[in-house]
Image: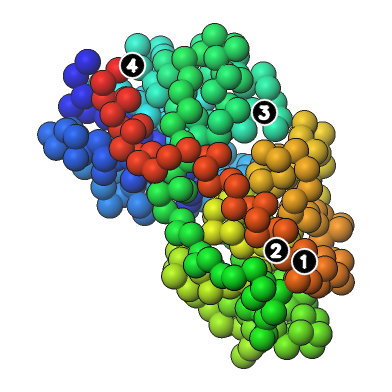
Amino acid sequence: MVNNKIFVSAGDLSGDIHASDLMREIKKINPSCRISAVGGVNLKLVADKFLDNIVSINAFGFLPIKQFLYLKKVLRKLENYFIEEYPDKIILVDYYGFNIFVARLAKRLKIPVYYYISPQVWASRSSRIRKLAETVKKMLVILPFEEKLYQNKGIDAIFVGNPLIDKIPKRQKFPKQSFGNFNPPIIGLFPGSRKNTIKRHIPIILETAKILKRKLNAKFIMFGTSEDIASQLPEYIEFCKSEDFERRKSIDFAICPSGTVSLENTLMGVPMVVIYKLSYLNYFFIRAIIKVKYITLVNILADKNIVPEFVQINAKPKKIVSAVLEQLKHENYICKVEELSTFREMLGIPGVSKRVAEIILSD
């Protein structure tokens, strides 16, 4: 099939990053390919035609009417664009709530759709699988169990590996006797990437750090996507950008939300506790539809509580502090590091973006 015009859609920060990596690999294989996109700042850098920044609206859960109307406007723009330009292939990256409408539009216009990074249908709303089966030519999934999940529903699905294995470095291996002998421990603090999530997590994290500073004389590094956070920090908390993985390799422990960053810490072998707090409306909505026991991917993959989770009303500093202190004990720390070290191999082999590009362009 001709691959001269490809359109890609990604609606959140991590999807935008992975989509931009994929587009670079597509350009390497076919330099004449013209890329059009909706997404964020990363896709804007690689696209020949960038149609809209939908990452910047931070859409999640129940959408305010302003965001909803904005996305409808983007869809109308895409319909006109597809009719005029008629891409050879369309690639959707995660972000089901918007991308399913793009998939339906493409199906109506008979443009093949490839879905890279599956929505988490195994966690909630499994009815989405049927809708994907109606619109998507091929699913390119990044978790090993997702391949069979889709294949069993008659969807062409391939496990391609998780793109984080190409991005996340391993920490230096230390002798076992050094584990737990922190002098003092360096604790990474991760409030999240969405504005609303950061707003709810920062007070919890700062109070937790205050207690740990008193109990352990711990050192702290706050990792964020925006330096705006730095102005809110006390003098004993250093600020670094989230993507500074060399600095992240220095931390002994992490306090983080359950999304991409928890998987990054897993791949680095950094023990952690997970916190997550939503608006009450979004929380009760998600609790009503969720089908899994855990919210952290490492716990879901292992089907046990490797990483302690503190969600909503349980996300209290004193509870979090107790869990941190328990895990920093020598034997517990060794156990956690060894458990986390098994997940990198489980998530595939390096070269994920290149592999996905080759599959899509050869299909």
- Judge depth for marks 3 and 2 and give the one in front: 2
Cα separation, mark 1 vs mark 3, equals: 34 Å
Picture disc at residue 331: 1
Mark earlier in primary sequence (4, 1): 4
Q: Nearer the viewer, residue 209 or 5?
A: 209
Cα separation, mark 4 vs mark 2, equals: 51 Å
Cα separation, mark 1 vs mark 2, equals: 5 Å
- Whether residue 99 is visible to the viewer of this picture, yes or no, is no
Q: Is residue 113 left or right of residue 26?
A: right
* Local SS, label 2: helix
Q: Which residue is mark 2?
A: 334
Q: Quadrant of the N terminus?
A: top left
Percent position of residue 315, x then y: 82, 61
Percent position of residue 299, x then y: 72, 45
Q: Are marks 1 and 3 in contact (CB under 8 Å)?
A: no
Mark earlier in primary sequence (3, 2): 3
Which residue corresponds to the image point at 65% horizontal and 44% vertical from the top-left? 297
Q: Nearer the viewer, residue 146 or 126?
A: 146
Q: Which residue is mark 4?
A: 111
Q: Which residue is mark 3?
A: 122
